[in-house]
Image: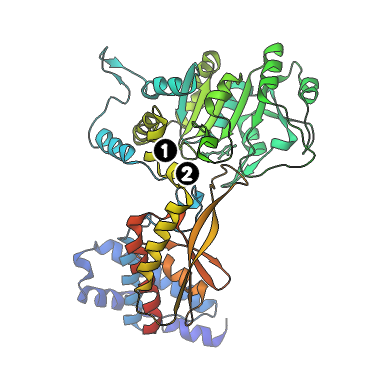
Amino acid sequence: MDEAVKKRLKTIPKMDDVLLILKERGIMKNVDKEIVKKASRRTIEDIRSAIRAGRKAPLTPEEVADKVVGTLFNLGEYRLRPVINATGVILHTNLGRAPLCREALDRVMAVSRGYSNLEFDLKGGQRGSRYDHLREVLLELTGAEDAVVVNNNAAAVLLALNSLSEGKEAVVSRGELIEIGGEFRLPEIMEKSGAILREVGTTNKTYLADYESAVSEFTGLLMKVHPSNYRISGFTSEVQLPDLAALGRRCGIPVLNDLGSGCFLDLDRYGLDREPTVREVVADGADVVTFSGDKLLGGPQAGVILGKKEFLERIRKNPLNRALRIGKMTLAALEATLMLYLKPETAVKGLRILRSMTEDVPSVERRAKLLFDSLSSIPDSGLHLSLIKGVSMAGGGSLPGSDIPSVLIAVRSSRISASRIESRLRSLEMPVVARIAGEEVLFDLRTITEEEIPEIKKGLEAALAKESRL
Ligand SMILES: *Cc1c(COP(=O)(O)O)cnc(C)c1O
């Protein structure tokens, strides 16, 4: 070891000296002594590794004590926090996808603050099933025969594949072997489920005959997957669900359709790209349908499995279902979200993601002007603001390729770089997540509510002021 490094290692303060300082500063009043000790030990170890690696490190007992206080202070702060989504990506996977509606929040509170009939049949006074609470409303909204809900859609697909095709071949088009965000890759999920992937067709063209010739005594399932986050265009051909369902019926093989988003409304009525609704998919003859609770549906993270009774029975009874089961808070939120759909206009009004997707441009522009005026009052001579047109995205693997026109506020400072402002905005107590384009920070008003405008102003002001203090 380098002599200089050895010498520096010897100058690391003693743990007792650091603890004494911490005690004098009154830290032990709020934090248990053992926790302070552990944090101090860890900090000293970090300093030792830093010195060994030739990096700079705090060396006086006071400096080390400061560092310990820093880590203990962070410990008491919430890490999972609300943020303002100024990105214009409506179903932002990294920002928690769909915000919950008022009704869902109220039901989570009402059901979880005390006891509930989660698995209790209030009529008979005996054990009930957690799946019963949502079955009727789901069947009413989709026309399916039966329903089960699990933790998320990845779990729904895994469970359906395992229940219906373990040790047997699941036939899928090469054009539908998707990967979506968060490490969901269909071939890998399939392997874990115990189903054997049988690819048919080509990337751009798959015909019914391709499925037909793959069917044998080893086939367990015919599967169709929504491509979610990409589109194949040009010289293409895919088999429509009614044809695949007819083939399945002819051969006595169930057909699974993984929809990903799972839409309950006619989106084209609201000027968005057309997506088949869950009801249409059920009517088109899919035996089992899977989709997420927190994509286009606009509810909590959950996976919905719908379909024919005989297959849903097998899915419900699968021991894996117990491992993937849905919690009571999610059930409460999902039930409230589904109830809104009993009247579609209520869903569009009440669910923030549907409101964001369907809001007309003049209405977004009105909010953009409010933000513009609010930011204009920041007393900073280096600040340049402009109101510009742009596009928002549905995100979350929903409505791929459909840009939604929007209005944005672009912010530029003659003193601070855009990337600096953007990172400062992220580190605020109420973080604002914005986009950068060139030398400008962009705030997309489609994902910003009117209530968030004062907070953004406060945030930008703080981000700019911080710099002037340095
Ligand atoms: C999003 C998606 C999934 C995974 O759903 P999660 O709710 O994220 O678990 C599976 N399949 C498709 C087609 C999807 O779009």
Residue 56 falls left or right of residue 207: left
Q: Residue at x 61, y 36 (%)?
A: 189
The reply to whether residue 163 is in sight is no
Q: Residues within 10 Å of mark 2 (few under 14, many from 20)?
A: some
Q: Which kind of residue does numbered mark 2 sit on?
A: Thr
- Which residue reaches farthest front? 362
Say which residue label 1 marks: 348
Question: Cβ(mark 1) to ligand 1 < 8 Å?
Answer: no
Q: Secondary structure at mark 1?
A: helix
- Indicate the quadrant where residue 16 lies: bottom left
Q: Name the residue nearer the viewer: 346 or 396.
A: 346
Q: Quadrant of ligand 1?
A: top right
Residue 259 placement (x, y as % from top left): 58, 32
Residue 150 placement (x, y as % from top left): 46, 31
* Rendered-image quadrant of the N terminus: bottom right
Residue 101 falls left or right of residue 434: left
Asked if residue 447 is positioned above or below residue 249 in the image, the reply reads below
Q: Name the residue nearer the viewer: 229 or 369.
A: 369
Residue 51 falls left or right of residue 327: right
Residue 377 placement (x, y as % from top left): 34, 73
- Indicate the quadrant where residue 225 lies: top right
* Rendered-image quadrant of the C terminus: bottom left
Residue 461 placement (x, y as % from top left): 36, 73
Answer with mark 1 or mark 2, whichever residue precedes in sequence: 1
- Any mark on residue 36, and which? none
Report if the CB atoms under discs 1 and 2 are less than 8 Å apart.
Answer: yes
Q: Name the residue nearer the viewer: 17 or 407.
A: 407
Measure the C-alpha gap from mark 1 to mark 2.
8 Å
The reply to whether residue 381 is in sight is yes
- Indicate the quadrant where residue 103 lies: top left
Q: Which kind of residue does numbered mark 1 sit on?
A: Val
- Any mark on residue 358, and which? 2
